[in-house]
Image: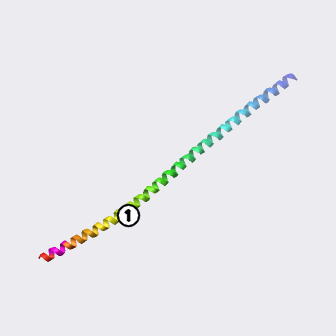
Amino acid sequence: MAGMWRRIRNALSIALIVGLILYVAYCTEELYTRIQNNRKLQRLINYEKEINELTSMLGEYKKEASHVQRSLKLLREAFDQVLGDRKAKDFGDR
């Protein structure tokens, strides 16, 4: 009878140890998953910051491009006017 109780106690001890190992493994996996999700979230937040910065830079470039286009238009008009004046002067000199 004592041998049977010893076997039961050993079996319960082994079952408890196996249960504890499985619980630790589950907690470790859960912790690993949370760490991975946290890293993904951090990466997404960094991407969002970079997107906002690039969008802001693109807006500035668009503004600068529109200023450059206006300047080119004014230069083209001035150049056309100078050419027109020069042609008129050349025509008048003939």
Q: Residue at x 57, y 47 (%)?
A: 41
Q: Is residue 94 left or right of residue 39?
A: left
Residue at the extreme top of the image, as rendered? 2
Q: Residue at x 54, y 47 (%)?
A: 43
Horizontal and vertical percent position of residue 37: 60, 45
Q: Quadrant of the N terminus?
A: top right
Quarter-of-image position of residue 64 = bottom left
Q: Is residue 14 above or below residue 75?
A: above
Q: Residue at x 37, y 61 (%)?
A: 65
Q: Is residue 27 above or below residue 47?
A: above
Q: Residue at x 34, y 64 (%)?
A: 69
- Residues packed near mark 1 inside 10 Å, few (<14), some (14 to 19) or many (20 plus): few
Residue nearer the viewer, 3 or 42: 42
Horizontal and vertical percent position of residue 30: 65, 41
Residue nearer the viewer, 16 or 43: 43
Quarter-of-image position of residue 28 = top right
* Magenta stretch in the rendered image: 86-90
Quarter-of-image position of residue 79 = bottom left
Q: Quadrant of the C terminus?
A: bottom left
Q: Is residue 86 above or below residue 8?
A: below
Horizontal and vertical percent position of residue 62: 41, 61
Name the residue type under label 1: Ser
Horizontal and vertical percent position of residue 76: 28, 68
Q: How is the image coloured?
A: rainbow
| Secondary structure at numbered mark 1 | helix
Q: Is residue 77 left or right of residue 18?
A: left
Residue nearer the viewer, 61 or 26: 61
For the stretch drawn in magenta, the main secondary structure is helix
Residue at the extreme right of the image, as rendered? 1
Residue named by callout 1: 66
Report if residue 94 lies within the magenta region. no
Residue at the extreme left of the image, as rendered? 94
